[in-house]
Each structure stands twice: as structure tokens, then as C-alpha cells.
Image (cartoon, rainbow, N blue to C red):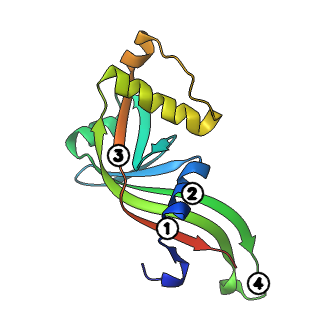
Amino acid sequence: MRRKDKERQNKAAIEKILNEAKVCRLGLFDGVKPYIVPMNYGYKAGILYFHSAREGRKVEILKKNPVVCFEIDIPGSVVSSEEACSWSINYRSVMGEGTAAFVSDENKKEEALRCIMDHYSGKTEWSFSSEMLKKTLVFAVKAENITVKESET
């Protein structure tokens, strides 16, 4: 990271951002072009969980190339200045890499979906019909090479 003054290596800072943020931007590569997709997610014990329809561009790319990168941020306020190029913004962000793995085991799929629901609702007591589980694709990304950056001026 170029700006070492903004880097945070504290595991608690990573966990805080991952648990507070609401959108994960998942970066994929189809062999020709990069593709970025904003997604809902859940996070637990170093694993990011995602749900998706069973088909579409994202799924086709993941089947061919499961290597991904991700970015999650919590935007803050704009910091103005009298000079045009001295403006800034306060933020906290996490970036990392990993390999996506499709979750097919029904119990693990339910666990992943509960993790996602907990992230947004604050509760884990959810039930999922067999029909819903069949039509929902779930994949997990073990978060690796994580960097955290914070800017507060």
C-alpha cells in the first residue's frame, strides 16, 4: 500500500468494517474483461458469503474463473478546502482477494444464508423452504490478502 499512514493492520478494524458495511463490490475476470458487481453479503470467521440467482454473467464467470477480489467501504463525509485539489473524503475500506466456492450442501447453504440475513437484520432465526434453497445459488470466498485503509482528516 502506497499510503502507509492510512493503512490499518488491526484485525478488530477489519472485523468492524466487514460487520458494519452493507455492500461488497466483487471483482471478477472473464479472461478478457474485468467485471464488478455490488452484492449483499454475510461475513463470519474469515469467510464472505453471497447469494445469487443460479444463472447470469456473474455465475458463468465464477464457473470459469473462481478467483475474485473484493472491496467493502464505509463512506464518510466530504472534507472541503479552499484549494481544488485539496478536497478529500473520510472513509474506511477493506480490500482483499480469494477464491469463490459454490456451496451445495443444504445445511451449509442454510448456515450461509442465515449469516447473510444476520448481517442485515441482526437475527439468525430464519427458515428456508426446500424450493428456495434449490433456486438460490450460494458461494463463499475465504478472505485473503486483506488490506484496510482509513482516512479521517
Identity of the residue drawn at 61% across and 51% down: 20
Relative vertical location of residue 69 with respect to residue 114 in this rendering, above or below = below
- Identify the mark at residue 17; answer none if there is no mark: 2
Label 2 sits on what residue type?
Answer: Ile
Do the CB atoms of the residues marked 1 and 2 lie less than 8 Å apart? Answer: yes
Relative vertical location of residue 83 with respect to residue 117 in this rendering, above or below = below
State which mark lies toward you, 1 or 4.
1
Residue behind mark 1:
148
Mark closer to the chain start, 3 or 4: 4
Residue behind mark 3:
141
Label 3 sits on what residue type?
Answer: Val
- Identify the mark at residue 86; answer none if there is no mark: none
Res. 54 in view: no
Mark closer to the chain start, 3 or 1: 3
Give x and y (percent) for residue 113. 47, 29
Distance Cα–Cα, label 2 vs label 4: 27 Å
Mark closer to the chain start, 1 or 2: 2
Do the CB atoms of the residues marked 3 and 2 lie less than 8 Å apart? Answer: no
Most extreme residue toward the right is 82
Q: Is residue 56 left or right of residue 40?
A: left
Identity of the residue drawn at 70% across and 84% down: 84
Identity of the residue drawn at 55% across and 63% down: 13
Label 1 sits on what residue type?
Answer: Val
Circle 3 crowding by C-alpha within 10 Å: few under 14, some 14–19, many from 20: many
